[in-house]
Amino acid sequence: MNLDIITMGPLLVEIMRKELNQEFHEAGVFEGPYASGDTPIFIHAAALLGAKAGMIGSVGDDGFGKCVVDKLVKSGVDLTCVQTKKGMYTASTFVGYYNDGSRKFLYHLDGSGSAAFNPEGFSAEYFKGCKWVHYTGFSMEASESYRQAAYRSLKMLDKDTKVSFDPNIRPEIFTPEEIRRMCEPILKRADLILPSGEEAMLFTGASTEEEGCRLLTEGGKMVVLKRGINGSRFFLENETIDVPAFESEEVDPTGAGDTFAAALLTALIEGKSIYDAGIFANGAGAFAVTKKGPMEGAPKREILDAFLASGKKVLDITEW
């Protein structure tokens, strides 16, 4: 099939509080559903930006499942390896937002069709000619079947296929030692790692995020630290490259990091320099936060190209 980018993970929906500072135990208004899941967000953004993109995962055969599948079909993602689990519900996450910018998540994943993935449901043929395969820690935490699927797929990759890994860990689910053990095979094979500062320290035992990121570059890996309004920092074995951010009005930050990662891989596939790839990814991330819903702000390619060509440092979404 010769896809550019493949990822795997559960397909789910997000339902969010309409007002700030409402706890989940309080009566109030929610809105949604919005198509979600960290890897579905990622692959949706990659397809919008022009990459030939494929998704491996599972979903229930209900209205929420149709919400996610329809979204990915519309963006052009190949769903050959997405399994629909008959008689099962699609996973959901409820999100609450607060004045200080924090969020709370309430997941309904265990026992869902989104988690009940058959790890034997794809073959090596699907990965032939693929340029990048993207894994996340959240998908590996989702269920034992996704962990086995990740390890199984690693053995199927061509030597020229590159691997990216966004830990996106929920530390309340596993202990630090369990997280390190679970992620070790992916980290070892990864060419690109996109950790938070805390994750860089967790994986390496470093006392600072900078030290952790530098340690993760051993063996020639690229490590990218997403720093929000401060842009992104690229760590190579012998070099550090800072790429400035674009300003935009934040409506919903969910999915911005996944959109950033998708844009980064798309740019690297196209042969952009690391700095230019970072600019491309930062621009995509700036768009991602401007609309409610984790996939809604991801830009189409022509819009992102036009914005970057304008030379503007501040994104006014009403212009695009």
Image (tube, rainbow, N blue to C red):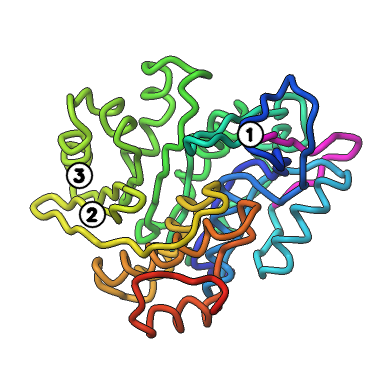
Earlier in the chain: of badge 3 and badge 1, it is: 1
Q: Quadrant of the rendered structure where residue 267 is?
A: bottom left
Q: How crowded is mark 3: few (under 14 residues within 10 Å), some or many (20 or more)?
A: some
Q: Where is residue 149? Give x, y as percent.
A: 57, 38
* Label 3 with label 1: CB-CB less than 8 Å: no
Q: Quadrant of the C terminus?
A: bottom right
The residue that appears at 80% across and 47% down in the rendered structure is 65
The residue that appears at 32% across and 30% down in the rendered structure is 198
Judge by depth and name the residue closer to the eye, 84 or 72: 72
For numbered disc 2, what is the local secondary structure?
strand
Q: Real-space Cα distance between discs 1 and 2? A: 31 Å
The residue that appears at 29% across and 50% down in the rendered structure is 224
Does the segment drawn in magenta span residue 91? yes
Q: Quadrant of the N terminus?
A: bottom right
Amino acid residing under circle 2: Phe
The span shown in magenta is 82-96
- Give the prevailing secondary structure in the magenta stretch: strand
Amino acid residing under circle 1: Gly
Q: Real-space Cα distance between discs 2 and 3? A: 10 Å
* Label 1 with label 2: CB-CB less than 8 Å: no
Q: Where is residue 221? Give x, y as percent.
A: 24, 49
- In this rendering, the label closer to the viewer, 3 or 1: 1
Which residue lies under the disc numbered 3? 217
For numbered disc 1, what is the local secondary structure?
strand
Q: In this view, does 313 lie to the left or right of 68?
A: left
Q: Real-space Cα distance between discs 3 and 1? A: 35 Å
Which residue lies under the disc numbered 2? 234
Amino acid residing under circle 3: Thr
Which residue lies under the disc numbered 1? 96
- In this rendering, the label closer to the viewer, 1 or 2: 1
User: Compared to 37, does 25 lie above or below?
Assistant: above
Q: In this view, does 123 lie to the left or right of 227?
A: right
